[in-house]
Amino acid sequence: MVYALRDTACAELSSKDAGKSVVLNGWVSRRRDHGGLIFVDLRDRSGLVQVVFNPDLNPEAFRLAESLRNEYVVSISGKVALRPEGTINSNMATGEVEVLGEKLEILNEAKTPPIYITDNLEVDETVRLKYRYLDLRRSEMQRNIILRHRVTKVVRDYLDSQGFLEIETPILMKSSPEGARDFLVPSRVNPGRFFALPQSPQIFKQLLMVSGFEKYFQIARCFRDEDLRADRQPEFTQIDIEMSFLDQNMVLEMMEEMMAAVFEETLGLELKRPFPRMEYKEAMSRFGSDKPDIRFGLELVEISDLVAGCGFKVFANIVAGGGKVVGINVPGCAGYTRSQLDELSPLAATYGAKGLAYLVLAEDGVKSPIAKFFTETELQQIIDRFGAKTGDLILLVADKPAVAQIAMGQVRLEFGRRLNLIPENTFHFLWVINFPLLEYDEEEQRYVAVHHMFTAPLPEDEAKLESDPGNVRSNSYDLVLNGVELGGGSLRIYQRCLQERMFKAIGMSMDEARDKFGYLMDAFEYGTPPHGGIAFGLDRMVMLMTGSNSIRDVIAFPKTASATCLMTNAPSEVTPRQLKELSIKTTV
Amino acid sequence: MVYALRDTACAELSSKDAGKSVVLNGWVSRRRDHGGLIFVDLRDRSGLVQVVFNPDLNPEAFRLAESLRNEYVVSISGKVALRPEGTINSNMATGEVEVLGEKLEILNEAKTPPIYITDNLEVDETVRLKYRYLDLRRSEMQRNIILRHRVTKVVRDYLDSQGFLEIETPILMKSSPEGARDFLVPSRVNPGRFFALPQSPQIFKQLLMVSGFEKYFQIARCFRDEDLRADRQPEFTQIDIEMSFLDQNMVLEMMEEMMAAVFEETLGLELKRPFPRMEYKEAMSRFGSDKPDIRFGLELVEISDLVAGCGFKVFANIVAGGGKVVGINVPGCAGYTRSQLDELSPLAATYGAKGLAYLVLAEDGVKSPIAKFFTETELQQIIDRFGAKTGDLILLVADKPAVAQIAMGQVRLEFGRRLNLIPENTFHFLWVINFPLLEYDEEEQRYVAVHHMFTAPLPEDEAKLESDPGNVRSNSYDLVLNGVELGGGSLRIYQRCLQERMFKAIGMSMDEARDKFGYLMDAFEYGTPPHGGIAFGLDRMVMLMTGSNSIRDVIAFPKTASATCLMTNAPSEVTPRQLKELSIKTTV
């Protein structure tokens, strides 16, 4: 052996080990010289332990220790000792002991790192990303990556125990005309042709059901070449699940059990089950969102009926035209000034609402530019409907139903934050179920699928597919955690006759469908079982579990918002020879 | 519910269930009409069970059963019954029982499948690949995919139990000037630039060691845009492992334990440990291969010393020039005719040898065109060295050492097959260790790395790096199973001074290295621990375990030898708009 191999991990040591001889390998986290001794905080993946070099006891080791600097890699042999009275460090897991260094070997030196290897690092993220291999040494990043490993392990264990098979589907697949933008891969062997990277294994997982595997899953890498918003990555990871011979309840119960196992085994938290289930329609009307944050109240209240015939023509006309008037009551905010109130309007406007009205319930009566349009009785009815009291502030939006609800939902979230109504460190799961199957696309002048065109309608709504397509609900479900969508799925259409009706509803002929989804349509004709599934965003899930601010903090080597890797400088230019072999040219 | 959901899997049923009411969901595997009854073999993932429809007992179900055809998807409710005396089918796991069908629902119909859903299917593979979703219904394919799932599960369980973390590394990475040809992905956001798909996570796994994760693994998708040989895939899966603070023995023992767990838990086989270890040099001299099939003997024998000064100038000159004369003794093959013997020459020639000499040990003496060049004593010495006896056939190649050994190694394999010396259904593992670190490249007139330039030399050979580079062994290891390389790895260079010597040995300056491996060289300066690892080809491993003839039989959706998917027709043409967005043009 060229150096003494460790027999112990740093953080394993405790007072029980006093007197034991150990070999440790790790990094110098910190060196201090004090009272003629050298103290080294030695770090390995397990944590830290203090090593002391004493010139009287081991002059040779001490002399070498004088050359130690932060992040040097060392092998240290020594004896575990209880720390002297008064030097016990209760902030450190191994704070009751120290190792008396007898032999020191420097395995590798280190330049001064450009970032501190410490938690709560305040440094520009671009520096962290450029030196990602150092950023990942910080214990908070180590914790995140370790938790991510544990989450996927528990998911795999649970699904395996339920008879699910993990089956790998291709990364080099066919480009699809539907959905988001594909990443393309030019084929050298087939010049002029391209593979696409999968946006999800959706088609393959459905084909695996046609193949009779019955229960499939995959922790699958997916790719979307979208303009990146703050917290999107061009490649991301999905817990992808599909099964045959099922109903909606089976999926929901199984996934709750899986999440419970994950939270219990990784965070030691017991989740309350069953998770509440809420129809999409209810989620929209109560929270103005298809992914409500149910950690706090401030629920939306509709007053369309109360203002239908009122003197305020804006409200009355909107209600007459099929719109809604909805609002929230913000307790104790009657003190908001005119300009504070005016600042709220743009917030609602972002989501399409044309304005935000308010009623201030002041000590001396209702203050509002629109109060004068209402009778006393009407005003009282409105206040009663909100359960508002003096000192409160009622905010109102009137618009098309979805616009009014969504805008008000955003205002609700804003006040949840402003009023500190959102408890931290709690996990509130919610199923939002039975989304609309179709929505009318004004531009295309036809109905389009809300999820995708293989999503099944609810059995009880199937009959309305021709007569009332806008009111058909799909057999679908999203899992929401603290107002963030963790994932979702649906039961699929598996019978040809229903599929034809679905195509008809969205104005597509069977021939056109065959053109677009040829092999899938073929496959469906050879005995397709009833099937359905779900997919969860792993990155987002681990982000919520670790309390991270960004999915970049739970991905070992993430890309920036402009889809580059600051560490490796990918993407990069390639050689003319590489392009020639691929039969392509760049046009820049 | 729209149909009766199953409560039982077909193959779970046995005589113990007689009298029980069950609901089954599955596929009609076969329908027979006999004695006024309809018999259906119902199939789900678990297996088959026979269902009987009797017109007297359930006229309605019987009438519907008359419309059943192969691969229809059905839900059947009925009572389990013992089969009547004389109708027990011992070839079927559930052959003692049948289900008396009371209620039948047809969940989906099926066209006549283009291939039979049966084992030992004799049909062109292109048809199987085109209808992969049906091919995968066949029980041998189901077994393969299920075994693959189990193998990866056991690997993950084992590595997790040893403290390894599964960490995902990017699929969209930087193109590297070294190694095989990269698949490229044009970047839309960064026009003119490209990502590359990883040939392996090598660089990232080393960076994770720099990050202090100490034990990493990943079941990782890898990509190589090579001209495909019969059994290569453009994307393949690797069990990728790296660890810090280790020696060679630790890696080997841990991997043996992992393989033992895999074989025990998936095939119920106990592997004999420790696996034999053989120096590369010994493997070459005894078997003429760096991946010897040790399931049989026919070992190579060297007679260079015996023929060094002999009258056969071809042999004598080759030995004088540093070459070797090696051969094998093929027992009982003295009867080979002249033309049979001549047919062997091309076999050796494929691997670079200029000819194959032979000595036939006939009843009436040694027959050979070259016998006359040897003295009686020389001939006897050769025969004795081989331990040959009358009736045997000695085959000889004289050439440069490696050429002679490799050619003879191939002849050995050929006779192993011809003489049926290779036992089936046994698994012989072997470590081949300590490969040469460098080999001289005649074309480039310099030494090149045999593995890659971060592979560490053996500590005991390090001193020879400048004085005798061709004889420095690397700290490397390949795991060989039945003559097939399952994987390999090495300990890496982690110290700057040794890395500089290595670069010098291959004629590369530190500046040039920094140009090529910039961020990696940087990373290595911030406290890199001693580390090393290994990677196994999962596809190949599962192929050997299932006794499949091709890795395509253990991949759910493989590509053909010309890198196309016959089911989806990928790669395909894409729209001009897609290319324009990516700032590329095709040149075909």
Image (tube, coloured by chain):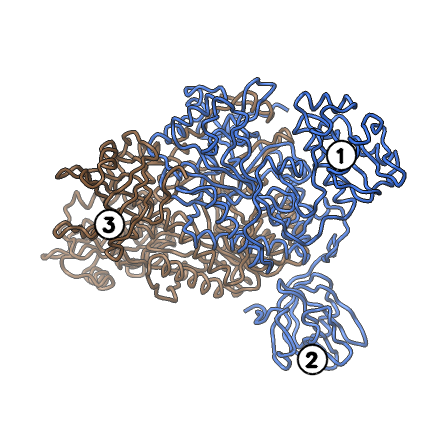
Chain colours: A brown, B blue
- The vertical placement of A81 against A256, above or below, is above
Local crowd at mark 1 within 10 Å, few (<14), some, or many (≥20)?
Answer: some
Using the image as rendered, state which of residue A277 and residue B344 is in the foreground: B344
- Tag nearer the camera, 3 or 1: 1
- The vertical placement of B358 against A49, above or below, is above
Local crowd at mark 2 within 10 Å, few (<14), some, or many (≥20)?
Answer: some
Q: What is the C-alpha distance between the residues marked 1 and 2?
A: 73 Å
Looking at the picture, how far across and down is residue A582, in whole percent? 59, 27
Looking at the picture, how far across and down is residue B248, in whole percent? 47, 41
User: Which residue appears farthest toward the left when viewing the image?
Assistant: A364
Give, as a three-letter code, the residue at label 1: Gln
**Residue hosting label 1:** B381
Using the image as rendered, state which of residue B181 and residue A179 is in the foreground: B181
Residue at mark 3 shares a chain with residue at mark 1: no
Q: Relative to residue B273, is residue A275 drawn left or right? A: left
**Residue hosting label 2:** B82
Q: Can residue A318 be seen in the rendering of this structure?
A: no
Q: Can residue B469 be seen in the rendering of this structure?
A: yes
Residue at mark 1 shares a chain with residue at mark 2: yes
Which element is circle 1 on?
A: helix
**Residue hosting label 3:** A357
* Residue at the spot 41% in from the left edge and 19% down from the top edge: B511
Q: Relative to residue B529, is residue B22 drawn left or right? A: right
Which element is circle 2 on?
A: strand
